[in-house]
Amino acid sequence: MQPLRFTGRTLEVLDQTQLPEHEIWETCDTYEGVAEAIEKMKVRGAPAIGATAAYGIAIGAQQGSELSKAEFLPFLAGVCERLAKTRPTAVNLFWAIKRMRGLIEANAELEVAQLTELILAEANLIAEEDVRLNKQMGQHGLPYIPDNARILTHCNTGSLATVDYGTALGVIRAAHEAGKNVTVYADETRPYLQGARLTAFELHRDNIPVTVVTDSMAGYLMQQGMVDLVIVGADRITANGDAANKIGTYSLAVLAKHHGIPFYVAAPMSTVDYELETGASIEIEQRSADEVVFIGGKRMAPEGVPALHPAFDVTPHELITAIITDRGAVERPDTDRMAKLK
Ligand code: MRU
């Protein structure tokens, strides 16, 4: 179950807002269409939006193929700027755009058609690498998943949030593939319900036992001794190991600490932002209050009452048992230990 299909000229995006009820593939044939698919969360998850942005630049390059060389480079700069404005928190988006910009700058002397070919190839490479790195991460995570583990996870960090395989769900998948008996509690993940709609959908399809719980049940489950470990993904990890992830992750980390339960974060190196020292500098996306107030099109709170919708929170590194990356795991992460991964 992959979220993206690049046809060479267009990007097909599996509309995740419609899952699990409908499997609708939307065709994006302009970079603006790609940007809107990210903004509207038809495609979401940090690594997936990085790869999507790279394909958005490839589509933009094709749209600009009739331009003169002098016009082409500023046009591409505009494409990159538009895609960079879609969502602020997941650094993978900016990582992918920076990588594509670097490629464009290094090959600026090429003709439009040749540069477009290179851009296309680089977008494909980013997508291919993502899958390979996720599988590596899965192997690095294996030692942390004991046989018979009962695992609590939050949001969706699987194939749908990446190009394939997943980050935290990738580690769970790797344990399952290694023959370990694992069962998963999927937080429903209010307000967007990535856990109930997407994680449950993916795991159920792959025959990995999964039970949906509401976010507010996590403390109860831990108190009852029903959780052996928590594993989540990340949208941005700073130089000291603080990790931004879906709203509600921080509460889970505090609860896990209180109950002496290991709390793991799994993310590729493209999620690590060494330019920010601590999580306090991470921009947290503020989304529409309507996404909180309306459920299935029905208003749940009285009209006129405001609602908040920070889409992410930051878990301080002190609460993280280990950060698992494609380069290996960092136990008790801090600035020094994170620097060794660089
Ligand atoms: O708002 P979303 O659905 O894009 O948020 C996704 C998450 O928070 C994931 O946990 C994170 O991107 C890691 S995905 C591999």
Image (cartoon, rainbow, N blue to C red):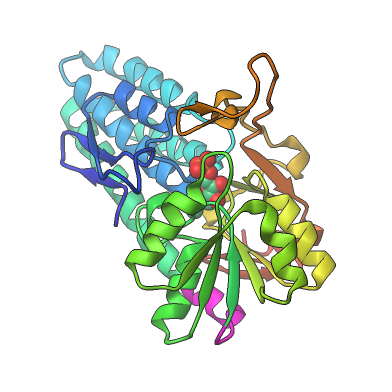
Visible residue check, residue 319: yes
* Pick the front one: 194 or 333: 194
In this picture, is 177 found above or below 313? below
In this picture, is 139 found above or below 319? below
**Viewport quadrant of the C terminus:** bottom right
Visible residue check, residue 240: no
Residue drawn 35% across and 45% down?
19
Residue drawn 61% across and 78% down?
144
Specify the quadrant of the image occupied by residue 324: bottom right
Asked if residue 202 lies left or right of residue 217, the reply is left
* Pick the front one: 72 or 30: 30
Specify the quadrant of the image occupied by residue 16: top left
Specify the quadrant of the image occupied by residue 177: bottom left
Asked if residue 33 lies left or right of residue 264, the reply is left
Q: Is residue 335 within the magenta segment?
A: no
* Pick the front one: 270 or 104: 270
Per the rendered image, the range of residues in magenta is 137-148
Residue drawn 36% across and 30% down?
37
Question: Residue 291: x and y, percent?
Answer: 54, 29
**Viewport quadrant of the N terminus:** bottom left
Question: Residue 132: x and y, percent?
Answer: 37, 64
Q: Is residue 138 within the magenta segment?
A: yes
Question: Residue 226: x and y, percent?
Answer: 67, 75
Asked if residue 271 lies left or right of residue 318, the reply is left
* Pick the front one: 336 or 12: 12
Question: Residue 31: x and y, percent?
Answer: 30, 25
